[in-house]
Amino acid sequence: MKRPTKEELMAAKGERVKDVIAMDLKCLFCGINPGQYTAWIGHHFGRPGNRFWRAVYKGGFTPRLLTPFEEIELLKYGYGITNLVQRATLTASEVSREELEKGKDNLVKKISKYLPKAVAVLGVTAYRNAFGQKSATIGLQKEKIEQTRVWVLPNPSGLNAHYTPADLAELFSQLKKETEMIEFK
């Protein structure tokens, strides 16, 4: 695939990427917002340095490593993707607290409509700001959204040097094991 020009990337600013979502998912992965490269190709976690697809594979969610262009395949395994904020930016730091709070409201509406067993927000700082949970840490949260369990995982962006690929694989694996055991009461 050809690389985008600077002009093409800049033209993708503010664009959206369609949700990969269906009823009764095992887990809905929720990114912060699409990057401009992702918006340019039109598929989630599309930037070559993003570690989402490898973490999903190493975590046991898929039997093989998928590419962003195969994102729809997640649905047949019971998983989906959305974002807190729909507009594409060059970096997540361009997203305001107000946008994250509004994004939380939209996420709650999606969860109420599609009823996933779990949602995994990919970014602890974004989760803290969107949900007003200043002391939230990585892992299962005490709060639920309706009956949906809420996890927070690290942002898989290649810019997030706090977590190695092995760390991400382990955290995603823990989420996978725990989501397999969720039953609605």
Image (cartoon, grey):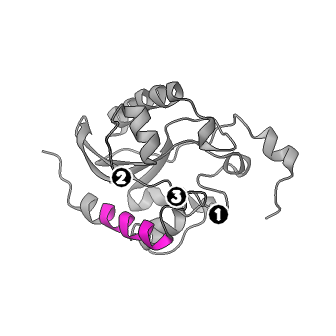
**Nearer-the-camera pick, 64 or 9:** 9
User: Which quadrant of the view contains residue 166?
Assistant: bottom left
Of circles 2 and 3, the one toward us is: 3
Using residue 156 as the reference point, say whether residue 4 is left or right of it.
right
Residue 67 image point, x, y percent: 60, 65
Crowd tier of the residue under label 2, counting other residues whose Cα lies within 10 Å: few below 14, some 14–19, many 20 or above: many
Residue 30 in the image: above or below residue 54: above
Residue 39 in the image: above or below residue 153: above
Residue 55 belongs to magenta span: no
The tag earlier along the polypeptide, 2 or 3, is: 2
Q: Which residue is mark 3?
A: 156
Mark 2 near mark 1, Cβ–Cβ under 8 Å? no
Q: Which residue is mark 2?
A: 27
Chain part drawn in magenta: 165-176
Kindly report the distance in space between the C-alpha atoms of the residues bearing marks 1 and 3: 9 Å
Quarter of the image where the C terminus is located: top left
**Nearer-the-camera pick, 170 or 134:** 134
Q: Name the amino acid type tagged 3.
A: Pro
